[in-house]
Image (cartoon, coloured by chain):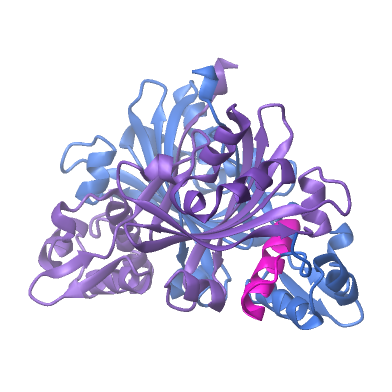
Chain colours: A blue, B purple
Amino acid sequence: MATGGGTGEGRTRADRARRVANVLRAQVLRGAFPKGVLPDERALVAEFATSRNTVREALGLLRDEGLVARRRGVGTVVVGRTYRHPLGELSGLAEVLGRHGTVVNEVREARSVRPPMTVARRLGLAEGSPAVYLERLRRVDGAPLSLDCTYLIPEVGGPLLARGREALERQDVFDLIETAAGEPLGRAEISAQAVVADPATCAVLALPEGAAVLAVERLTRLADGRPADLEFIHLRGDRLTLHATLDRVRGGN
Amino acid sequence: MATGGGTGEGRTRADRARRVANVLRAQVLRGAFPKGVLPDERALVAEFATSRNTVREALGLLRDEGLVARRRGVGTVVVGRTYRHPLGELSGLAEVLGRHGTVVNEVREARSVRPPMTVARRLGLAEGSPAVYLERLRRVDGAPLSLDCTYLIPEVGGPLLARGREALERQDVFDLIETAAGEPLGRAEISAQAVVADPATCAVLALPEGAAVLAVERLTRLADGRPADLEFIHLRGDRLTLHATLDRVRGGN
């Protein structure tokens, strides 16, 4: 067994700092620090069996990611709050976060449009068919969490527009669709990717320029398999993590 | 129905460009463009019913994300290749990508260490117990895809070290663990988040500074529920998307 650094000696201090930051980042996101205060530098030096400079560099990385901040007289504290979005089943944001915060949607656009051809195709719409475009900035407890751009088929989007802005501000779209349709939605195909947000998206989400967001694309289907809506969602990387439990052998097959 | 822009009029050109980029980004990631060449500006202007300046700005956003490049005499082309990682079941990278590319792992560290306390706790190790630390840069068809930092319990990590570097370079860790244990792994809990990579990680992954990565934490358990390894994985945002199919009502409950 090698002696020395608890996270491996590393090749350079940057390597060692990265390893310490990996572990601390996961703890921040799990809400593992009581009252959101990280252990002091001396405790971290002991826990990671590394130098004070390495610990400082690791904390600097987490500060650059917007996850922690230095507060005078208190130490390093967790900034804001990160929400966990389970990927096990299809749920709207308010359904997931309902117990943890109040979701309010700022409706930026809600109207009938002629969708781009590729969107029309994915929604199963005939060429020239209209769609409903809905763009919402979603806040949890007042702070921006995501920017959702949604194209809906007219049968689903029309009744949504008719409900008016207030319903769109207070309710998940899934909820509104199911109320209108009188039946639950079916499945959704989602994909998620990390991107650096463009300046306009950063401004809307109150992020510093150059911040990372999760770019999620979600195609949701009605119970009969027909596409209902196609969404492009940008989620603040510092406020949301996706979670899933995966089985090595699915269903015992 | 409103007349005008296929993606909604938008408040500003930046808004309109962002909407066009949303749709094009999803197409790039799905591999929807024949031979990786995007339609020319004129075609995009028609498809999105928008101005040439908006199309140019949208293409500029995708260039900034490292997804496309302008090539003289050809137009806008998709850069590199994006791999899809399904989230439906627990699979190693080589298992997922085996048909699409050759995965080679560059072993940066492989040795016994004293793990940080929080890692020991999550792995169910007694205080002072060693763990095996394994750090690998993973390449697909030669190009870096991810940096995987793994802490393994000694019963699992020991036999892995004994296999030597060559096995670690060519095989998924899951595969090696199962061969050693003689039984399949159980479940894994994963979380994924978008972060801006630190400069050291960017250098290792051959990314420009300030690039976005998916930071994945994965705790994998043996069939009997005992933790086997805890991984911190940084995946290039421009090369990997996570995919899942979600049911609105799971298993009909």
**In the depicted view, which residue is nearer to us: B21 or A166?**
B21
Can see residue A136? Answer: no
| Identity of the residue drawn at 59% across and 26% down | B183
Q: Quadrant of residue B141?
A: bottom left
Report the label total: 0
Along the horizontal axis of the image, is A89 left or right of A133?
right
| Identity of the residue drawn at 57% across and 74% down | B198
x and y percent of residue B161 in the render? 62, 51
Magenta stretch contains residue B27: no
Along the horizontal axis of the image, is B205 left or right of B43?
right
**In the depicted view, which residue is nearer to us: A38 or B229?**
B229
x and y percent of residue B68 in the render? 27, 67
**In the depicted view, which residue is nearer to us: B59 or A62?**
A62
Q: Which residues are magenta?
A: A8-27
Q: Quadrant of residue A9?
A: bottom right
| Identity of the residue drawn at 38% across and 58% down | B239
**Is residue A197 shown above or below B104?**
below
Q: Of helix, strand and loop, which mostly describes the magenta segment?
A: helix
| Identity of the residue drawn at 29% across and 38% down | A123
Q: Quadrant of the N terminus of chain A?
A: bottom right
Q: Quadrant of residue A224?
A: top left
Can see residue B41? Answer: yes
x and y percent of residue B132 in the render? 69, 53
